[in-house]
Structures are given as C-alpha cells and as structure tokens.
Image (cartoon, rainbow, N blue to C red):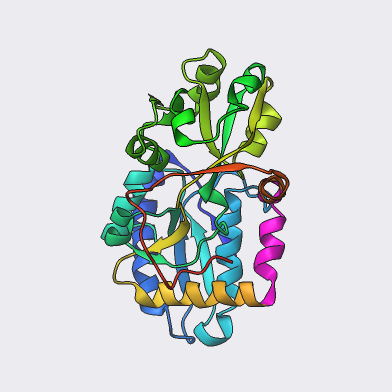
C-alpha cells in the first residue's frame, strides 16, 4: 500500500480535482472485488508523523484496510493536493466528487448526511473534557462540584465547534471565537475563564503555551464520538473499513497505534490519575448507536 501526496500547483488544481473525482468514482466500483485495485482519496494532512494526533486517522485507516486485503484486494490512499475547508470537503463527499473518506466528531446531522463507520476512533477519550485555565486562577476552580457552580464562569469555544452547541444547550455562559489561534490569547486576557478541551488535545496546548494549567479534579463529560464517514450509499466501503477496524482491535494493533501518539497516552494517563468530579452534560445532537464499538 502507498500513501501518495499529489503535487500541489495552482495551475493544476482544477485538473487534479477532476482526476481525484475520477479516482473517487473508481473507488465505489472496486470495493468488495479482490481482482481490482481500490484507490481512495482522503483529506490533505500536512504532518505525516504517526505520533501526530491528526495523522493517526490516516495511519489507522491504512492499518484497517491492510487487514482486509486478502478478502477485498489491494488499495491505495491518495491525499488531496491541499487542505480545503471542512464544509467544502463534506459537500464534495456528499456529491461523490474528489474525496472518499472523512473523519470527524459525529452528530445526528452528519449521520443523516453520510454513512458513519460505527467505531469510536478515540476510544471515548474525546468525551472527557478538561478545563484549561490560567494557572493563577486555580483556587477559583477548586470548589466546583456541580454544573451550577460552573455557571459562575464563562467558557470560550469556537463558533463552529460541536462543543459550542453542547455548552449552549446546557446553559453555560459562553464567549465564542472564530479561529482556534485566538483561543489562548483570549484566555490569557480573561475574555473568558476557561476552555473545554479534550484530554488528548490539551497535552500540546500545555506543552507549547506557558501560564496555563488543567483545573484540578474536574472534568466535563458528554457524548462526542469520532468516526470515519463515507458517502451515504457506499455501504461496501463502510463495511470494509468496519471489518478492518474490528480486526485491529482483536489483534491489538489498534492499541499499539493509539498509544504511539503521545497526546493519546497523556490523555488516558491523566484520566486514570485524576480523582475528578465529572459533570455530565447533555449533547442534544448525540446519536444512539447500540452497535457502536468503543475499543
């Protein structure tokens, strides 16, 4: 199997998208037939390091598909030539032109629009949210025991993040921001009091930003699984990915890959260490999938 990066040239972008759309069309025909070569177009990922949390989804997809070669035949993953906006890529996936697989947090709207592979790729880790705060304000957060206590503080959250819908639904005072890059400066200058961050996300934010800390002994919890998504009618591809993921879980290779990402290991280690008050929040867009696997 090869993971290919298309050459990025502004003058060739339109042509490349035509080619990618063609590869995408071939993918539907090839799945399930071991005599054909399956080509799948996936999003552009800048950092190609297996220890990076974003590249983990590419590495896991590669691993899962490799487990199905004997039954389904060879495959190839082709990266898009550059990064496009998330909603634009979703539209392309919906139309069957230019991308075959996306990965993201799940909700009712996305599962109605696309076909979700029912395996939580982050083992439920994304559901536990730490409170990222200014280290000088630890004492203010030490006595939070309930959602009512938490409502005395303002949470900062991205305007287009799923977390924002959850936080608003639970009536937590919220300050929105447009870009992720503005989160830390706004927290530093007290535009809001804390940010809700996944235990696997906060590791790098603490590593690269001085003056911040996780509020001790408190976590938020709400359903927020991460899935692979394919086109709504592409059951063959969804089934192949699902079968491959199940095999990685059964033979343990999933866990080897998962814990090879330092932020994942940090998140689970922190979760086990923290004797935390867990404040349950309702996610109004969460789906109920009795058949979903959480490794």
The vertical placement of 64 against 21, above or below, is below
The quarter of the rendered structure image containing the C terminus is bottom right
Q: Position of residue 139 (x, y in %)?
A: 64, 20
Occupied quadrant, residue 67: bottom right
The vertical placement of 137 against 15, above or below, is above
From the viewer's side, name the closer residue of 260 and 88: 260
> Which portion, as a residue range, is magenta?
251-265
Q: Is residue 261 magenta?
A: yes
Residue at x 43% of width, y 83% of height: 32
The vertical placement of 279 against 4, above or below, is above
Occupied quadrant, residue 212: top right
Q: Is residue 239 magenta?
A: no
From the viewer's side, name the closer residue of 187 and 14: 187
What secondary structure characterizes most of the magenta part?
Answer: helix
Residue at x 64% of width, y 77% of height: 250
Specify whether 235 is left or right of 51.
left
């Amino acid at each position: 199997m090869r993971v290919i990066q298309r050459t990025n040239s502004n003058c060739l972008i339109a042509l490349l998208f035509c080619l990618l759309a063609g590869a995408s069309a071939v993918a539907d025909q090839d799945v399930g037939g071991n005599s054909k070569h399956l080509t799948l177009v996936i999003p552009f990922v800048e950092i190609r390091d297996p220890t990076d949390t974003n590249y983990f989804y590419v590495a896991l997809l590669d691993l899962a598909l490799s487990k199905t070669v004997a039954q389904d035949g060879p495959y190839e993953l082709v990266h898009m030539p550059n990064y496009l906006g998330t909603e634009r890529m979703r539209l392309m996936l919906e139309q069957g032109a230019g991308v075959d697989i996306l990965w993201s947090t799940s909700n009712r709207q996305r599962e109605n629009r696309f076909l979700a592979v029912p395996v939580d790729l982050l083992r439920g880790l994304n559901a536990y949210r730490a409170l990222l705060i200014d280290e000088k304000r630890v004492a203010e957060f030490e006595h939070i025991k309930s959602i009512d206590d938490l409502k005395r503080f303002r949470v900062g959250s991205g305007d287009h993040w799923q977390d924002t819908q959850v936080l608003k639904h639970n009536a937590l005072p919220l300050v929105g921001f447009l870009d992720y890059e503005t989160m830390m400066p706004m927290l530093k200058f007290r535009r809001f009091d804390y940010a809700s961050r996944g235990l696997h996300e906060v590791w790098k934010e603490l590593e690269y930003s001085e003056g911040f800390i996780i509020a001790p002994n408190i976590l938020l919890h709400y359903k927020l699984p991460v899935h692979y998504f394919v086109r709504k009618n592409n059951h063959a591809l969804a089934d192949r990915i699902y079968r491959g993921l199940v095999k990685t879980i059964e033979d343990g290779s999933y866990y080897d890959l998962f814990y090879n990402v330092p932020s994942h290991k940090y998140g689970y280690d922190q979760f086990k260490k923290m004797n935390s008050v867990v404040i349950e929040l309702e996610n109004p867009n969460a789906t109920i999938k009795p058949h979903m696997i959480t490794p």
